[in-house]
Amino acid sequence: MGQYASNTTVSPEKTQTDIKETLRRYGATKFAIMEETDKAHVMFEVQNLMIQLTVGLPNKDGFIKTGAGRSRKKSAADEAYNQAIRQRWRALLLAIKAKLEAVESGISTLEKEFLAFIMLPNGQSIGDHIIPKIKKIAGTGEMPKLLTYGGA
């Protein structure tokens, strides 16, 4: 099965504009897009929840060679890298649209669709906070104590 938008020609900037328009249409009141060399973040507020989705961006060095191990010319490596960037942004837009449409259509709730991406007051996402605990539970089969009393 092919990767979604693997042949897209839509620029990351156009997709970022599409993301902002989608967020506005579904009621986001604040939003921002931030890029780093290895990841990009889309942050928005909706229904008093601050949500941040992060997508990993490919490493440019990973495009020096083809999948078969042949060396690429610099121009070909740059184009393959840029194609991968465009693909990631389009996939992120698709994920955001799908989640927001599921909420709009009554299939799900905002909290269920974006639970892992809701930001806590300490700057950590709920997913980053709870996923390690879930993995521990799955590995040990032991449920954590929900309430502790007196430091127990």
Image: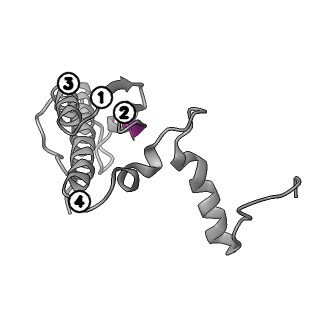
Quadrant in which the N terminus is drawn: bottom left
Relative to 137, 60 lies left or right: left
Q: Residue beneath label 4, please? A: 106
* Quarter-of-image position of residue 46: top left
The kind of residue on which mark 4 rests is Gly
What residue range appears in magenta?
50-60
Q: CA distance from mark 4 to mark 1?
A: 21 Å
Q: CA distance from mark 2 to mark 4?
A: 20 Å
Residue 127 image position (x, y, % from top left): 52, 49
* Quarter-of-image position of residue 124: top right
- Of the numbered discs 1 and 3, the one sitting upstream in the chain is 3
Residues under numbered marks 2 and 1 in contact, where contact means CB atoms less than 8 Å apart: yes
Residue 67 image position (x, y, % from top left): 30, 49
Mark in the foreground, 3 or 2 = 2
Which residue is located at x 67 percent, y 75 percent? 141
What is the tally of numbered marks visible in this picture?
A: 4
The kind of residue on which mark 1 rests is Thr
Q: Is residue 51 magenta?
A: yes
**Closest to the observer, 9 or 59:** 9
Task: Name the mark on residue 45.
Answer: 2
Relative to 39, 19 lies left or right: left
**Closest to the observer, 11 or 63:** 11
Which residue is located at x 64 percent, y 58 percent? 133
Q: Residues within 10 Å of mark 2 (few under 14, many from 20)?
A: some
The kind of residue on which mark 2 rests is Glu
Q: Secondary structure at mark 1?
A: loop
Mark in the foreground, 1 or 3 = 1
Q: Residue beneath label 3, please? A: 13
Does the magenta stretch mainly form a helix, a strand or a loop?
Answer: strand
- Of the numbered discs 3 and 2, the one sitting upstream in the chain is 3
